[in-house]
Image (tube, rainbow, N blue to C red):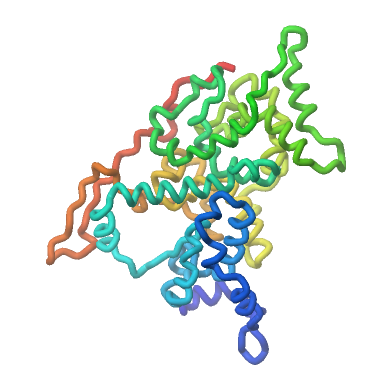
Amino acid sequence: VGDDECELYSLCEQLVTESGVANDALEVEEKEFSVDELCIDKVASDENLYYACRETCEKRSCCFESNPTYSCYDLEKDWCDEYKACAVAEYKFYDEGSSDKDSLDINAVGLVGSSSSSEHDLYVSIDSVCSVDNLRTLEGIEQCFNKCQSYLCCFPEDAAEMGWDCEGFREEECSAYGNCETLVATHNLWKPPSKAANKYAVKIAVNDACILSGGVEPTEEWVSNCHQKCESRMCCLVDPSIRSSCQGAEECNDYSACKVLIGGDSREAESIEDACSNVNDANSFAKCEAKCKSRQCCFEDVYQFSCYHLEKEWCDEYEICDMVGLTPSSSSNALPSPGAQISAPSPSQSSSQTTISAPTPSITPGVNNYGSGPSF
């Protein structure tokens, strides 16, 4: 282990006894909960099981560090592999030992299957955070929004949003993020009141549904009522600098109270620099990580399903998130398309000479690719 790793993990010293032997309480706890029993396919439809699986996987979190410098996978491969079932809860190993050639051999055998598998993994994870049960809580709605916000244009919910539909040119992404539709279509579509007699009628109705009196705790019924009023205009809550936002629409002012569903004013109260500039203990790590996950789509493992190539400038504002192991997926992590050209290496070639022609993204960064947006 090098000096860099030891320095980064210096605070872990408090977990070691004076005799130099690590406390075995964690080992006992691990034996009580088998990761193979918790982390099963059912996590996609069982919120409690999903979070129980993730909590268990966190006990060996160093195995899943995305930065190879700080991952313990290469040092403790057998130990980490005992937790390979964590993949169903979005915990993946960094494996420095696997070569480009190994990856190509797998893709060459089942090129389409490999892409479908990764898309399925993403679909399952969204199905969990955007399940109807999870959307009964404010925390669940915010989790789903964080993952889906760049793809809400895939799901226009009424005629006013049809001009904002992007499914036609984001077909692959919209398919992978299909379960995000529950965020905007869980309830019966709300019919806003007419503004003929009172131009503030919609705003008043939304405020009545979504503004709590001081000290009153939100109930499941209150969350559901507010969400119903807001779900078809969740695009109004998306950062205005990205394409999936409709904040420029005049009607969005009527839905300003909906922000309570994704953290309210506290969501932007602290800058990413303030949240992540001094990560030196578990609390500051958790605080930084939570802030980073407000733009979670930037950090999806697979390039095609990350919003980084669609919203690069927006994602780059959060580059400091590498402090907690969150880095944007690069094109080197792209899945080959079924039409990709694969050149198998000759015996004299090294694996590094193998080439894949990645598909050219159809989205032009910084350009509105779906017209002028909705006229609400």
Q: Give the image location of residue 49, x and y in percent.
A: 60, 57
Which residue sits furthest top?
Answer: 196
Q: Nearer the viewer, residue 174 or 295?
A: 174
In this view, 170 is above or below 348? above
In this view, 80 is above or below 260? below
Query: In which quadrant is the C terminus drawn?
Result: top right
Which residue sits furthest bottom?
Answer: 19
At x 49%, y 48%, the residue is: 124
At x 58%, y 47%, the residue is: 129
Q: Give the image location of residue 290, x and y in percent.
A: 63, 53
Q: Give the image location of residue 1, x and y in percent.
A: 46, 79
In this view, 162 is above or below 105? above
Q: Nearer the viewer, residue 92 or 6?
A: 92
At x 38%, y 30%, the residue is: 169
| The quarter of the displayed image where residue 138 is located | top right
Side of 257 relative to 311 (left or right): right
For the image, the number of numbered tags is 0
| The quarter of the displayed image where residue 213 is located | top right
Q: Give the image location of residue 139, x and y in percent.
A: 68, 46
